[in-house]
Structures are given as C-alpha cells and as structure tokens.
Amino acid sequence: MFFETKALGPTALSPVWGHERPVGTSPVRTTGGSRGLRPSFCSGRSPAWPVGRVTRGRVSGGPVVTTEAPSSTVHHPEVSSSSLVSMTTDYDVLVIGGGAGGLSAAGIATNLGAKTAMIERDALGGDCTWTGCVPSKTLLKAATVVHQARTASKYGLTDQSVDVDFGGVMDHVRQVRQEVYEEADAPEIFEDLDIDVREGDAHFIDAHTVGVERADGSTEQVTGRYVIVAAGARPLVPPIEGLGEVDVLTNESLFELEEQPERLAIVGGGPIGTEMAQAFARLGTEVVVLDMADRILSNDDAELAATLRETLEEEGVEYVLGAQVEKVAQSGGTITISAGEQGPVEADALLLATGRTANVDGLHLDAAGIDYTRQGITVDDRCRTSQGHVYAVGDVTGRYQFTHMSNHMAKVAVTNALLKVPSKIDADHVPWVTYTEPELAHVGAHAADLDEQGVSYETYRFPYDQLDRAITESETTGQIKVHATSLTGKILGASVLGERAGELITAFTIAMRNGVTLRNIGDTIHPYPAYGEGVRRVADQWYVQKQSPTVTKMLQTVFGYRGPVLKYGPDEIV
C-alpha cells in the first residue's frame, strides 16, 4: 500500500495558485507537495496544490516576494559520516511533511522495519486531498455531468436544461474530500502502523535534530538518524500592482466557495487554469483566461494544446494570450485586470494559477547545513541533500511537481537510506495529464526537443475519429502522437489528446521504460473495442511506413500475386 498512494497529476507541470499572504511571512507548511505537476491539479507539468483551507480573503499588502531563499545555491559542509553511526537518535527515520511524499516515505520506512515519525502542520493528506487533486477532479466530474445533460442530443437523446446548485456541488466536493481523508489519510491509519504522527511546524535545530512548534505554543525536539524532507510547496503570488488590495481566489479558498461567481478571470493558462476554466464554464460561469504566453499548456504538444483550446473556446471560455497583467483593482464587487494592449478585463472573481514556490523558508536549512536555492532544496539523483543522511522529495525540491513523482522520489529516498541499494530518480519517463475533457497527456520528448538534440525520428499518429470505441461514444476529438526511431520503432516520446488519455499514456510510459518498441506493441493483441486499441493502431502506422513497394513486387514475382502495389504517404493513416 505504501508504494502506491493516490496519484495526482499536477497539478500540473505547473502553474499553481497565488497565495493569500506574501510569501515568506509565515512559518513553513510542513505538508507534502502536490499529489500530482505539473502542472495541474494532479497532473503536472505542474501541477500541484498547497495544503490548507484558507477562506477567501485579501492578499496582504506590501511587497510580493517569491521566497526568502537565495537565487544561488547556499553551500554547507557535510556532517561527518562517523557521527551518523555513533549517535543515538529518537527515530531511525524522521519525515517532515504529511502529504504524498511524506506519507509514502513514512509508510515504506516503517514497512522496512524502521522506527518512524512524521511531522505535519495541517491535516494529513497534503495538497492532493485537501486543495488539489481530489477536490478539483470531483468538481470536474460534476461539471462534466452538467455538460453531458445539456449536450445529450449527440447521443440521440434530448438536450436537458440543468439548474446548477453551486452550493450543493461544493458541499459534495468537500464531502468527497473528507471521505478520502478518512479512508486513506487519517492519523490513526498510520499510528496503527506504529508511525508516530506529530502535529506542528517543523524546523531544523541541527543536521539530526528537528524542532516542532505546536499550535498551542508548546515545543519539542526530536532526532532522526535519517531525515526525509517532504515539506511541499505553496502558491506563488506574482508581483502585480494592486494585488494586495483585491479579493483573490487560490487553491486554498477555491473549494470553500459557497456562491458561484458570474464572471471568473483566471491568471495562468497552465493545467490548473485550464482545468478550472472548463469546470466553471460548464457550471455556467463566464470565464476568461489570461496568460503572458501566446499559447496555453506550454509544456504540452503545441498542436494538441491548440486543439484543446479550440474545444474550450467552443464551450464559452475566452482566452487573452500574450497578456501582461500589469495591475488589478477592485471597486465593489467588480475586479478590473489591466492587461496592457489587450485592454482591461472585468470579473467578479479572480483566480491565480501562476506558479508555486518550494517551502524552504521556515525550515532553518542553514542550521542543518543543507544546500538550497530559491527553487528548492538541492538534491542529487538519489534524492540526497548536501547532508548525506538528509533526503528531500517532492515539491520542496522544485523538481517534478506531481504527486506521482513525490511518491517515486519517496521510494528512491528510502531505498537509498535504509537498504543501501543504489536507486536513482527516473527523470526520463515522467508522465503527466491535464484532466480536461478531452484529457491531454504526455511522456518523454517533444519533437522540438528531439530536433534540438539532432535526434533522427519519425512521428506516427492515429486520430480518435478513426478509433471505433471513440466513435461509439461520440468522443472523437483528439489523436495519439508518438515520436519514435524509424528503424527500430523505439519510442522517444508520446502525447495523447482524447478520452482516457491519462490511461493510454501509461502504456507508453511502461513501453519506454522497458524498451518495448512500436513493433512489440503492434504485435500484441489488444481488446476490441477499447480506447487502448488506439495504442496498437498508432503502432501499426510504424508498420505501414516500413512497407516497401519493392518488397511487394518481389512477393508478387515469387508467389504470383496479382494485387496492386500500394504505397502510403508519410501522413496517411491506415
């Protein structure tokens, strides 16, 4: 159970939310990072969400900063390895943070026989349970049901008018969130496994000692032979004039809404902004998304992201791209966003989905001699910090901000710490998903990456409008794209836009990690009709492009065959 906890996505890779107070003005949240990157609420490319249940409010006035950490690395000498063996500590493994990475690390450690403690400031479960994956996906599902009822005619039914009880929807979101917590994240679950769960803010006293400040003001100190930092990240507030005087929504307040905004402006066109744009638009809110880039979802395939944008625009989402948000102001219930040449945008609510910053300030890393930068704690490919007995995993490292990567890094860290078996982060096969409808997923290299590296490859495609299961369900928007070597069919990268893309991308991830080629996939029996058949059909395109008219003519000569000699163009789908 500890090697697989609830997987996000990303949060996306990763634009995340703005924060409700200036970054760096409060103690660090000892929470795990997103249960998902990237970009999305469980995606990734960031996507991920800080823990907390903060009500809607104002960003505190004053300068907006990203973190107290320096932009360059702070270096410290390593504690002598001999002291690690000789000292007596309270715990074998001390985990800071009870989100995805922390829960996984603590579970694996105790499963291997280590005396383990976990320190968490808020409720266990981290961003994914409380302010990310779980509530966002629940909200998306409710919005999908509304959309399906209103567009039932595409199934031969009658379109239905649906009255949205927004308060009821949000109550449902919070109920599901609580159910997930009680089922998977409640402290007693881990205490039953002899994991000592401690509540409070954690900070280093020295390389082996961690101070814990409880909510009642009491303090204690605990020591660990090994320390695993899984303190997560928090929303980044961009330096926008007037932001401190405006009511804003972030992930910490979005799912506490009781009243539906008539007009919602979202700053950030990454996975989080994209998912919530579709959800609120389907529930009946007028949505406009502003982003400084000239496209959305910059970490995804440009062609597929453009198709997804067109889909959302058809559903009523407005995009203002290439926008420099210079100033915001509020008068009564109206928020005005000044976006340079793009002109002002007015809304009743403003949602920030503009990035995240690692929770390094407040941990007192200098006291432990741990190197870090503004981006996060510095780790090697084994999750080790500059202190060999201290590991860091998940969002606090500033890398791979997905729940599934937090879990993976936790496994890597504990394996290296307790088993002394060399284990490295698999940075080459990191999938992510944006959970819109249709979903957009990716793993591996993009075409631009391969072009820049001078790698020879071919791109193979299979559209959803030729996939029988998609046709039967009227879900024909999208396609599967695979970049692979022409000679061997080695998969270098894959993107999927379409129904259940998040499931299909797993097949390509497994294939890439284990050296399974397009030829192997094409030779494997896939069930019909299933969306997974699309994986085989795109592999078939590799076979088609390998077909040679010369070989066909030779077969005709040898065996006397009399059919046509077919030759397919590079973009022809068979």
Image (cartoon, rainbow, N blue to C red):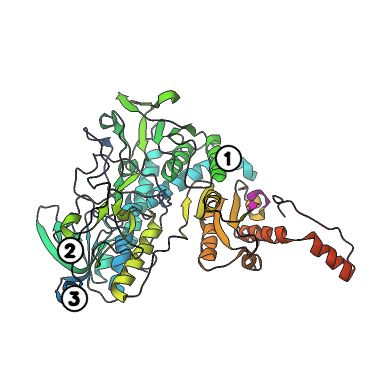
The span from disc 3 to disc 2 (Cα, nearest Å) is: 14 Å
Check disc 1 and give the amino acid type.
Thr
The span from disc 1 to disc 3 (Cα, nearest Å) is: 66 Å
Q: Is residue 498 visible?
A: no
Label 3 residue SS: helix
Label 2 residue SS: loop
Q: Position of residue 129 (x, y in %)?
A: 34, 54
Which secondary structure class fits the magenta region best?
A: strand
Q: Is residue 110 visible?
A: yes
Answer with left or right where residue 352 lies relative to residue 160.
left
**What number of labels is visible?**
3
For label 1, the residue is 151
For label 3, the residue is 85
Tell me what residue is drawn at x 29 percent, y 52 percent. 376
Tell me what residue is drawn at x 30 percent, y 66 percent. 105
Residues in magenta, as a range: 459-466
Check disc 2 and give the amino acid type.
Ala
The span from disc 1 to disc 2 (Cα, nearest Å) is: 59 Å
Check disc 3 and give the amino acid type.
Val
For label 2, the residue is 207
